């Protein structure tokens, strides 16, 4: 896969994750007064990093032979395209007297951060396509 395609796919996935993060943060704010509601967040980058590291580590690993397709596959790289964002619920904290752990100010700040991140991702994707457009002119 060439660098352009990989970059565009990664940017597209990152934009999808940002959109999901926005929905989760908005849901947290909407439920900030609900008793015993626990805030959620989206986990994506750590799994994506693990997938990239597993692909890089396969160059230095020895290959294991499987005699049956039902055997556990070890040392196979984890494809980054298979990584999906996960909603994670914070069950460990409870900051309000009603058992709720949503801080509305933190969530509002988080939404601003998500919006700026999304804007940056759109600019990066625009830059990628402008480079292709420039190359096609020449």
Image: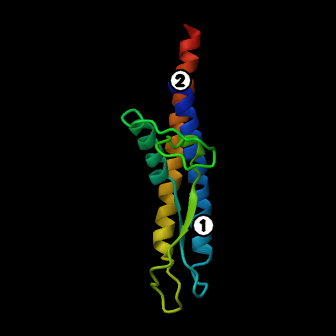
Q: Which mark is residue 26?
A: 1
Give residue 82's position: percent from left, percent from top.
59, 45
Q: Which residue is mark 2?
A: 2
Q: Residue furthest bottom?
A: 97
- Answer yes or no: is residue 122 visible: no
Of helix, strand and loop, which one carries label 1? helix
Residue at horizontal 52 percent and vertical 32 percent from the top = 7
The residue shown at (36%, 35%) is 60
Which tag is nearer the camera, tag 2 or tag 1?
Answer: 2
Locate the N terminus and report the quarter of the image it occupies. Answer: top right
Residue 81 is drawn in which quadrant? top right
Counting from the top left corner in percent of width and height, residue 80 is at 53, 42
Q: Residue at x 63, y 44 (%)?
A: 69
Q: Position of residue 37 (x, y in %)?
A: 58, 81
Quadrant of residue 6 in the image?
top right
Helix, strand or loop status at disc 2: loop
Does 107 sit above or below residue 62? below
């Amino acid at each position: 896969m060439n660098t352009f395609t990989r970059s565009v796919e990664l940017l597209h996935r990152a934009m999808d994750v940002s959109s999901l993060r926005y929905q989760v943060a908005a849901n947290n704010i909407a439920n900030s007064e609900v008793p015993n509601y626990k805030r959620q967040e989206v986990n994506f980058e750590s799994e994506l990093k693990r997938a990239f590291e597993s692909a890089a580590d396969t160059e230095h690993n020895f290959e294991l032979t499987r005699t049956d397709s039902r055997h556990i596959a070890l040392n196979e790289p984890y494809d980054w395209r298979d990584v999906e964002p996960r909603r994670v619920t914070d069950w460990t904290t409870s900051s309000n007297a009603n058992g709720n752990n949503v801080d509305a100010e933190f969530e509002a700040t988080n939404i601003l951060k998500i919006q700026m991140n999304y804007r940056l991702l759109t600019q990066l994707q625009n830059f990628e396509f402008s480079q292709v457009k420039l190359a096609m002119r020449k």
